[in-house]
Image (tube, rainbow, N blue to C red):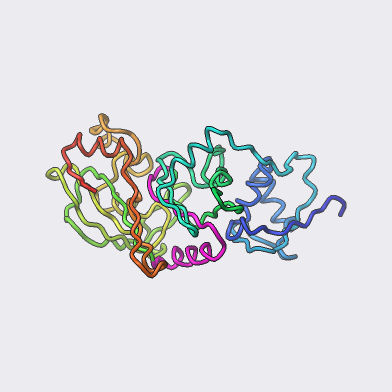
Amino acid sequence: MSGVEIIKVKTEDEGMRLNRWFLKYYPGLSLGRFQKLLRTKQIKVDGHRAEASLKLSVGQEIRIPPLDEEKTTPVMKEISAKDAQFIRSLVIYKDDNILVLNKPSGLAVQGGTNTTRHVDGLLDSLTFEKSEKPKLVHRIDKDTSGILVLARNRTWADKLTKAFREHSLQKTYLALTAPAPRQASGDIKAPLEKNGEKTVVFEGGKPAHTHYETIDCVGDKFALLAAEPLTGRTHQIRVHLQYIGAPIVGDNKYFIGEKRGKYALLSDKLHLHAYKIDLSALYNKKCLIKAPLPDYFHQDLTNVGITFRG
């Protein structure tokens, strides 16, 4: 067919889902049109029918049907000096192999519906002395702040992707909850399943395990918890803490209603922070990276009378 293109997947797009790839290079293509092209096999990967969730590999060939009339030619948006300075200001660790950002709450890791400013779109400003831009190897929620690790070369991208997939890296999050959990520490093992834009506890869902410990509390009103996700489900910590009756302050998805109104004097941002990650196993030496708390989080701990010296 005239106008059909065959495009090979680039190194920088390794592991990206097919729907994300089209969103990146063909931003004018509507979701409905994209799904129809998949159903009618007009979009193929390596000559085969593909699902939107297919994770791409370098060198795979994507068949692109004629899309000129939809004005969906790839768009390369120039990064402003202000945005370049902003994304560089988030770097808290850098060596030859990785970069670590302290991502603010509200900044998405990747693009999506109505999301045009995100970490993925600013990676070209994080090359520094390298010729290749860094690669995303994991994600955290848009509303979650804290540690985001980027790989600076293919070898470390593979190492980190494998480690995050196998959950072999110890990650610790800090969460301010209201009220405090009934038990000071514990393991939450409740299977989870996606339900639209939310995640819910569901008996037939995927296994999910979160360990938590209380760092400090104000009676039963507030608690600062250290939470370790031992599996990697969407919104896992948020849903698990809500499930045991200790939702996270500022959580607009899982902490709503009359109860939340009692804490209106606190920031309405999500009080969940990816605080530290232990990369020692990958470096064969001690490598523990911590991300300072956002100002609003730190101030609200003071406001409710919780002490944290991280």
* Nearer the observer, 28 or 276: 276
Relative to 34, 116 lies left or right: left
4 lies left or right of 253: right
Q: Please name the residue shown 43% across and 68% down the image.
A: 166
Front one among 294 and 87: 87
Q: Residue furthest right?
A: 2
**Where residue 107 appears, x then y in whole percent?**
46, 40
Residue 266 is drawn in which quadrant? top left
Q: Position of residue 256 (x, y in %)?
A: 32, 38
Question: Would you say residue 164 sits in the magenta stretch?
Answer: yes
Tell which of 282 and 175 is nearer to you: 282
Q: Which residue shows up at 67% across the image and 47% down it?
A: 25
Classify residue 92 as left or right of residue 73.
left
Q: Is residue 169 magenta?
A: no
**Identity of the residue furthest to the top in this view:** 265
Residue at point 60% right, 51% down?
Answer: 20
Residue 198, placed above or below residue 53: above
* Residue 93 located left or right of residue 155: left
Image quarter in which the N terminus is found: bottom right
What stretch of residues is rendered in magenta? 143-168
Extreme residue in the left direction: 219
Q: Nearer the viewer, residue 172 or 265?
A: 172
Q: What residue is rendered at 37% in x and 39% in y?
A: 252
Residue 7: image quadrant is bottom right
* 174 relative to 163, above or below: above
